Image (spheres, rainbow, N blue to C red):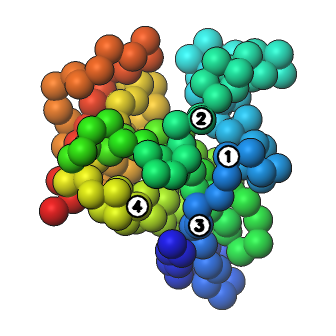
Amino acid sequence: MNTNSDVQTGTGTAPSRWTVVPESFTTADAIALRRDYFAEVAGRYWEREATEAEIDQGLAEDPATDLLPPTGEFFVGRYGDSPAACAGIRRLDDRTAELTRVYVRPALRGTGGGAALLAAVEDAARGMGAERIRLDTRSDLVEARALYTRHGYAEIPAYNSGPYAQHWFEKKLV
């Protein structure tokens, strides 16, 4: 699966291209993006920078092994040739997929990377037979909540009891 999206950078330059493709979460690019994701979400939660040891611990406690086919998948988004975004998807049941690990590097937010990630993940969920996609997020991740709302996700009652889940969203895929 390859999702391309022409986007304008806002700098007056020619359009750049986002490309989102499935990629093992163990590649160097995927690991770097997952580290950046954990650094940001942990730092925002703790209201301080996360240490390398804390990032290592976060990755060890959440190894992403469920983001492998046939029950899941991990995606890397590239802006031009640079790895700049990631997202994962996993099956919760025969009709439901769950979106996780959505991250776009801060310097590239607003350039279409989030939309490109969501399009790729939603296509993958449909390919798994999912009729809906769900996610949970925190109150402090306001950019993420705005992205989901812009792309048709509606807030729903809690479907899990994750320790950091404060908002739950769902989008119908059929």
Residue linked to disc 4: 124
Residue linked to disc 3: 21
Q: Are marks 2 and 4 in contact (CB under 8 Å)?
A: no
Q: Kindly identify the residue that appears in the image at 66 percent across and 87 percent down.
A: 14
Q: Is residue 2 visible?
A: yes
Q: Quadrant of residue 96?
A: top left
Q: Position of residue 77 (x, y in %)?
A: 62, 62
Viewer-nearest residue: 9 or 137: 137
Q: Kindly identify the residue that appears in the image at 76 percent across and 65 percent down.
A: 82
- Looking at the rendered structure, the kind of residue marked 2 is Ala
Real-space CA distance between mark 3 and mark 4, rounded to the nearest whole angstrom? 10 Å
Q: Are marks 1 and 2 in contact (CB under 8 Å)?
A: yes
Residue 43 in the figure: left or right of residue 93: right
- Looking at the rendered structure, the kind of residue marked 3 is Val
Secondary structure under tag 4 reads: helix
Real-space CA distance between mark 2 and mark 4, rounded to the nearest whole angstrom? 17 Å
Q: Give above or below for 51 relative to 64.
A: above
Secondary structure under tag 2 reads: loop
Real-space CA distance between mark 4 and mark 1, rounded to the nearest whole angstrom? 16 Å
- Looking at the rendered structure, the kind of residue marked 1 is Phe
Q: Position of residue 84 (x, y in %)?
A: 68, 57
Viewer-nearest residue: 33 or 1: 1
**What label does residue 150 carry, if any?**
none
Residue linked to disc 2: 64
Q: Residues within 10 Å of mark 3 (few under 14, many from 20)?
A: some
Q: Are marks 4 and 1 in contact (CB under 8 Å)?
A: no
